[in-house]
Image (spheres, coloured by chain):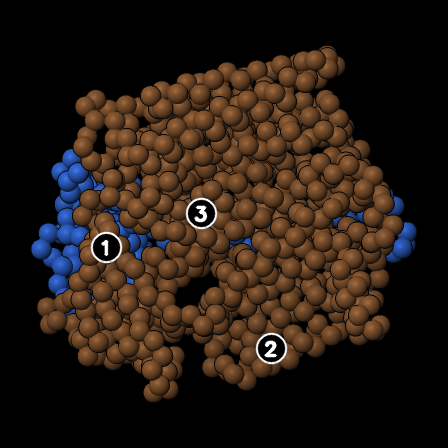
């Protein structure tokens, strides 16, 4: 039988193999999604939800004016605000070129035991003309969305 | 004046594209040769019109005609000429013009060199190609007209995003678009075949060169983009699983699968409906990629447009073409008769496995890329899916595929002897084992998987060339005769070996940099030192510089290796006053095996400069491998049997001499 599979059996072999591989891939994808999804929160949402220490999130908002401070070699403290609530952030590394006070920023990391958000990556990839859509949405949610003033000019 | 001509040429192109869509389609339906023949001049004239529009736009950028809004918004008189030329596609409108320009170029090529295509198939292919042209020309004219005038004209333009002012990125879009749009040929052939209800080996012979051309261009385009990200963004990484990157990877994966299934169709006349489906999917993913990148739903240097009308318009185009093609497929695909039988263990079987795994990888990347967008558009929470997801899914799917790649070419069509194939790969297996052990001996500190990955890469390289070595009977007959045989081997055999080996080289690069990279992030004063990867960097000086359209702060590092002076490295931080934007200019010292990568940041209150240094072992191999892959595609493309428009008899003559490759 092994040598002389009928046409139908051969086709069935490939269909079963195909479904197994594709099904496996989708299962793998869903399983990986469950563990690796990072939620995006604004400072207001963080304080409302009472986020646990060590849970990885993306934090978005504006860098508060006058909050950026040097704290040791290549370590920087700043505050992210959605103009309603705010949270302190610490980051070690070189800030992106577009990082500026009063501008939109997205930081990925987790809240430390002292309540300070420890970022391991900071993104400010938007150009002068607009801010990251996530930040804009977070500002709209906090009711502080001012399309002209909030983008910091231009 | 030129702008008006360009605008008029675009409108004319739209009218011609409409004719090209409907007249030949009707002609093919009623079997009227005269009506079908209109497709050829229409495709050529459409190309000439769009080329004229493209040239008009180039002219406006080169002479800095700021009375045109697009030029005023995206160019500047002080910009170097090269970036004025490339500036045309450094913005939304211009890049769409480049898109239709390449689209019409492909159409014109089929029209001019498709003399031996059956009349009806040619007419239908050009009609489908014309309809894509209609959609995108309408899109340009209605939502993204590049020729809008400004009155009064400003004296100076507002400049091009400095991140885009880079040779790697300036040449990235033309390659990427040639790839994206090149799949439109496969799509047009697929839809035409569905309308005819007939797919045969000659159809596959026609589709393959176009797919190969598109695939080669896309491969190079992706590599250019990744290389650019590596040396400009200053994060030391080459691939971030960013949705924009995934958007280009998706059609590449589907296109790679198509390339392989088309071989089965050509040689064995089977896998018909699957190949047609892949052709539709490859271009659909290109369209989705265009949508993701251009609609502004993602934030990146690519998202020029935040005009929601544009995203919506592209979405409609996508739904029309993908939905239309898939419906046609559902309706007509059952007509495609199944071809020859084959055993699961055979070249066909191996290529099906390849296709299944590539399709699975495509699905995994697709889910990870679109799930956050879908969730967001349904009003769900905002989430991001990062590298951990892709590492957990893409890796496990691709690894088995990479492992079986060298077996494929050794398996015979129809029914193969797996044991014989394995035997012929003994040498490759031994080489892989030796390389793995060597890697473990040198770098035993890294993750235990790393030497295995390196061995897998070596297995791919050695295995790919085992097949050519076997076919020229290397070391079994005198070397001269082997060389003679090697010269007579079909180019596609060399292409296959090169492409597969390139994959192995890239894999080694990825494994090396992932497992053994070193990173130092610190702040040092002038005179400070950093030690990394056996190198010592001394910050000698930090000075100001003035470039053609920017000001820079430059750090001068004296690099020494084992106490001996090696080189100076000068990373910069540039400020572009016109665009009011800062960019990072990394300094990279490479010896083609590893990179030393230095980024300089700001000065802190204590006069220390923040510095980031990476030691990236094996990273150059990533791009070397991709170049080898692209070169393999090119070599295959030059194969006599695949030559675009090569008459069929040439193939049968050669078939007797050479066993078909890949």
Q: Which mark is residue B547?
A: 1
Which residue in the structure is indicated by mark 3? B172
**Label 1 crowd (10 A; few <14 / some 14-19 / many >=20):** few
B108 relative position to A83: left or right? right
Residue A41 seen in the figure: no
Of the pair B596 and B58, the residue shown nearer to us: B58
Number of disc labels? 3
Chain under numbered label 3: B
The x, y position of residue B27, in whole percent, is: 69, 14
Dot in front, 3 or 2: 3
Residue B137 in the image: state x and y as whole percent.
46, 24
Who's the residue at 87% across and 50% down the image? B656
Chain represented in brown: B
Q: Which quarter of the picture shows residue B519?
A: bottom left
Q: Which residue is mark 2?
A: B436
- State which mark lies toward you, 1 or 3: 1
Residue shown at 25%/66% (left/top)? B600
Whichever of labels 3 and 2 marks the residue nearer the N terminus, that label is 3
Precedes in sequence: disc 1 or disc 2:
2
What residue do we see at 15% from left, 40% from top? A153
Residue pictured at 33% horizontal, 36% vertical: B62
**Foreground mark, 1 or 2?**
1
- Relative to A129, say whether B577 is above or below: below
């Amino acid at each position: 039988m092994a040598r002389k599979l009928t046409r139908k059996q051969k086709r069935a072999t490939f269909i079963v193999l195909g479904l197994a591989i594709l099904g496996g891939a989708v299962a793998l994808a869903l399983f990986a999604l469950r563990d690796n999804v990072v939620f995006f929160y604004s400072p207001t949402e963080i304080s409302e939800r009472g986020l646990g220490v060590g849970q990885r999130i993306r934090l978005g908002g504006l860098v508060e004016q006058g909050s950026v401070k040097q704290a040791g070699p290549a370590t920087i403290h700043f505050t992210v605000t959605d103009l309603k609530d705010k949270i302190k952030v610490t980051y070690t590394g070189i800030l992106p070129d577009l990082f500026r006070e009063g501008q939109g920023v997205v930081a990925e990391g987790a809240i430390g035991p002292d309540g300070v958000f420890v970022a391991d990556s900071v993104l400010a990839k938007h150009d002068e003309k607009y801010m990251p859509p996530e930040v804009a949405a977070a500002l709209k949610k906090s009711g502080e969305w001012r399309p002209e003033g909030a983008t910091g000019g231009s | 004046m030129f702008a008006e001509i360009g605008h008029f040429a675009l409108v004319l192109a739209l009218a011609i594209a409409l004719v090209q869509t409907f007249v030949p389609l009707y002609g093919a339906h009623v079997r009227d040769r005269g009506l079908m023949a209109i497709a050829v001049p229409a495709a050529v004239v459409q190309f000439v019109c769009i080329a004229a529009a493209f040239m008009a736009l180039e002219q406006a950028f080169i002479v800095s005609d700021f009375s045109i809004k697009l030029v005023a918004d995206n160019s500047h008189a002080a910009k170097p000429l090269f970036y004025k030329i490339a500036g045309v596609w450094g913005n939304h409108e211009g890049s769409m013009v480049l898109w239709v320009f390449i689209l019409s170029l492909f159409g014109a090529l089929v029209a001019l060199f498709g003399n031996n295509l059956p009349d009806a198939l040619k007419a239908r292919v050009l009609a489908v190609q014309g309809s894509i042209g209609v959609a995108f020309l309408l899109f340009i004219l209605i939502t993204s007209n590049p020729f809008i005038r400004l009155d009064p004209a400003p004296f100076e333009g507002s400049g091009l995003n400095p991140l885009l002012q880079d040779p790697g990125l300036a040449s990235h879009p033309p390659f990427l678009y040639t790839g994206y749009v090149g799949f439109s040929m496969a799509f047009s052939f697929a839809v035409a075949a569905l309308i005819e209800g007939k797919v045969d080996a000659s159809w596959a012979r026609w589709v393959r060169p176009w797919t190969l051309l598109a695939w080669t261009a896309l491969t190079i385009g992706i590599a250019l983009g990744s290389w650019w990200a590596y040396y400009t963004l200053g994060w030391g990484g080459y691939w971030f699983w960013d949705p924009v990157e995934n958007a280009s990877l998706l059609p590449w994966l589907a296109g790679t699968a198509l390339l392989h299934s088309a071989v089965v169709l050509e040689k064995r006349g089977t896998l018909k409906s699957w190949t047609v489906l892949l052709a539709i999917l490859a271009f659909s993913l290109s369209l989705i990629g265009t949508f993701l990148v251009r609609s502004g739903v993602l934030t990146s240097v690519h998202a020029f447009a935040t005009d929601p009308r544009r995203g919506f318009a592209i979405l409609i185009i996508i739904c029309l073409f993908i939905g239309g093609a898939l419906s046609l497929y559902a309706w007509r695909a059952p007509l495609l008769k199944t071809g020859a039988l084959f055993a699961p263990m055979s070249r066909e079987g191996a290529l099906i496995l390849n296709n299944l795994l590539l399709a699975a990888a495509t699905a995994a990347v697709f889910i990870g890329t679109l799930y956050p967008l879908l969730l967001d558009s349904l009003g769900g929470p905002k989430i991001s899916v990062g590298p951990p997801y892709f590492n957990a899914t893409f890796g496990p799917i691709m690894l088995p595929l990479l492992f079986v790649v060298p077996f494929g070419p050794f398996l015979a069509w129809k029914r193969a002897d797996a044991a014989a194939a394995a035997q012929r790969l003994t040498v490759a297996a031994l080489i892989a084992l030796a390389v793995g052990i060597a890697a473990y001996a040198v770098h035993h500190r890294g993750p235990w998987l790393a030497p295995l990955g390196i061995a897998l890469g070596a297995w791919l390289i050695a295995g790919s060339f085992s097949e050519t070595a076997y076919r020229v009977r290397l070391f079994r007959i005198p070397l001269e005769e082997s060389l003679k045989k090697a010269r007579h081997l079909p180019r596609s055999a060399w292409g296959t070996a090169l492409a597969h080996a390139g994959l192995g080289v890239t894999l080694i690069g990825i494994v090396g940099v992932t497992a053994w990279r070193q990173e130092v992030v610190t702040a040092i004063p002038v005179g400070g030192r950093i030690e990394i990867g056996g190198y010592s960097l001394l910050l000698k000086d930090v000075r100001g510089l003035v470039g053609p359209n920017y000001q820079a702060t430059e750090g001068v590092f004296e690099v020494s290796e084992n106490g001996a002076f090696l080189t100076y490295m000068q990373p910069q931080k540039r400020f572009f006053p016109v665009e009011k934007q800062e960019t990072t200019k990394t300094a990279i010292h490479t010896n083609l095996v590893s990179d030393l990568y230095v980024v300089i940041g700001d000065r802190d209150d204590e006069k220390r400069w923040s510095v980031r240094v990476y030691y990236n072992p094996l990273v150059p191999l990533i791009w070397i491998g991709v170049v080898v892959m692209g070169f393999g595609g090119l070599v295959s493309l030059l194969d006599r049997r695949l030559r675009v428009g090569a008459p069929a008899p040439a193939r049968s003559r050669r078939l007797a001499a050479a066993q078909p490759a890949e």
